[in-house]
Image (cartoon, rainbow, N blue to C red):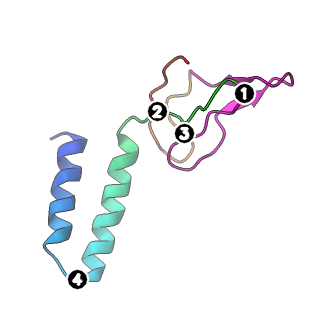
Amino acid sequence: MTNLTAQSILFRLKETTDDEEIQDAIDIAISAIEKRIQNRPIIKSNYSPALCPSCKIELSDHLGDGYYKHYYSKSICECGQKLRWIEY
């Protein structure tokens, strides 16, 4: 089973229950699955830092001249989010 399939099943399961505790548990499971799915860091330009799509932590160093050096080799953020980099 893929992460996307599991996420889809949990979304459908959440819609079938009115129990708030079960819905909260499903939300936590969905959040954990979402972090296992690779996501692109948020990069607006070379003049802005790369940000984790989940926790918004900076994934770059400021070079002092207005540019940022992005951590392209980093595959997982400290929050657990898997990262999928593309060159900008």
Q: Nearer the viewer, mark 4 or mark 1?
A: 1
C-alpha span from label 4 to label 1: 47 Å
The amino acid at mark 3 is Cys
Front residue of 78/88: it is 88
* Identity of the residue drawn at 28% across and 66% down: 26
Circles 4 and 3, Cβ within 8 Å, touching? The answer is: no
Identify the mark nearer the N-term, 3 or 2: 2
Give coordinates of residue 41: x percent, y percent: 52, 34
The amino acid at mark 4 is Asp
The amino acid at mark 2 is Arg
Dominant SS of magenta comes to loop
Give coordinates of residue 42: x percent, y percent: 55, 36
Q: Return the residue at label 1.
A: 47
| Label 3 crowd bin: few (<14), some (14–19), many (20+), radius 10 Å | many
Circles 3 and 2, Cβ within 8 Å, touching? The answer is: no
C-alpha span from label 4 to label 3: 33 Å
Q: Secondary structure at mark 3?
A: loop
Please provide the residue range marked out in magenta.
47-72
Q: Which disc, if any, is residue 13?
A: none
* Identity of the residue drawn at 76% across and 23% down: 67
Q: Return the residue at label 3.
A: 77
Q: Return the residue at label 2.
A: 40
Q: Return the residue at label 4.
A: 19
C-alpha span from label 2 to label 1: 17 Å
Front residue of 49/21: it is 49
The amino acid at mark 1 is Tyr
C-alpha span from label 3 to label 2: 11 Å
Note whether 34 is above or below 49 in the view shown: below
Identify the mark nearer the N-term, 2 or 1: 2
The quadrant holding residue 38 is top left
